[in-house]
């Protein structure tokens, strides 16, 4: 687990740096959520519109649109593929993203279509300490 200034990212997760989404490989599927720094920068999310199961997404394209009191923005997919599961608990209670970003706050599960290539554009959690430190300063400084 990489820990920087009270924030953390699991070693075995991958991060799409542009929008702070994480990818956790689980067998032949990828669970996706928002990093704790991304969640903190957004503020408590009060509304989320998640793309439905069966939607095909490309790396860097939105899987959801979220809104907090201080931010409205797209949550981008770290991998290309098809959404095979949507976290209905997060759809009902988007605050879970901020409260438990790496646990109950996951957003979707994707069946990847180009994982090997997509991973080349992500940073592994175990290698993210310096980048995470810079992002904490930039976003939350």
Image (tube, helix red, strand yellow):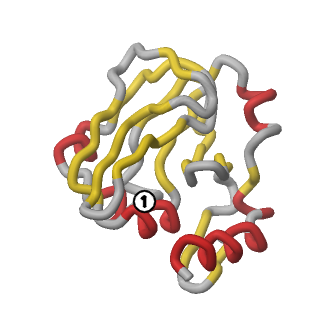
Where residue 12 appears, x then y in whole percent? 68, 54
**Res 8 quadrant in image:** bottom right
Q: In the displayed structure, would residue 16 be above or below residue 60?
A: below
Question: Neighbour class for label 1 at 10 Å: few (<14), some, many (≥20)?
Answer: many
Point 70% across, 74% down: residue? 134
Question: Is 11 drawn above or below residue 61 in the view shown?
Answer: below
Q: Is residue 2 left or right of residue 104?
A: right
Q: Position of residue 113 (x, y in %)?
A: 65, 17
* Residue nearest the viewer, comparing 18 with 110: 18
Q: How many marks?
A: 1
Residue 23 x/y as whole percent: 59, 44
Q: Quadrant of the C terminus?
A: bottom right
In the foreground, 117 or 1: 117
37, above or below 112, in the image: below
- Residue furthest toward the bottom? 5
Q: Residue at x 33, y 46 (%)?
A: 66
Dot 1 falls on a residue whose secondary structure is loop
Left/right placement of residue 10 relative to residue 129 reads left
Taking the view exactly as shown, the residue that stands out farthest to the left is 92
Q: Nearer the viewer, residue 77 or 96?
A: 77
Residue plotted at (55% across, 35% down): 77
Q: Residue 51: x percent and y percent? A: 36, 26
For the N terminus, the image quarter is bottom right
x 58%, y 20%: residue? 81
Residue where numbered disc 1 is placed: 101
């Amino acid at each position: 687990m990489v820990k920087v200034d009270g924030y953390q990212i699991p070693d075995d997760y991958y991060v799409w740096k542009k929008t702070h989404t994480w990818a956790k490989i689980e067998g032949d599927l990828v669970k996706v959520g928002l990093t704790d720094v991304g969640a903190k920068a957004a503020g408590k999310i009060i509304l989320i519109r998640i793309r439905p199961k069966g939607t095909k997404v490309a790396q860097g394209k939105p899987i959801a649109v979220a809104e907090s009191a201080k931010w409205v923005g797209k949550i981008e997919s770290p991998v290309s593929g098809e959404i095979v599961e949507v976290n209905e608990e997060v759809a009902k209670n988007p605050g879970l993203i901020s409260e438990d970003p790496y646990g109950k706050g996951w957003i979707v599960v994707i069946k990847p279509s180009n994982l090997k290539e997509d991973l080349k554009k992500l940073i592994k959690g175990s290698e993210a300490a310096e980048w995470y430190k810079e992002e904490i300063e930039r976003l939350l400084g």
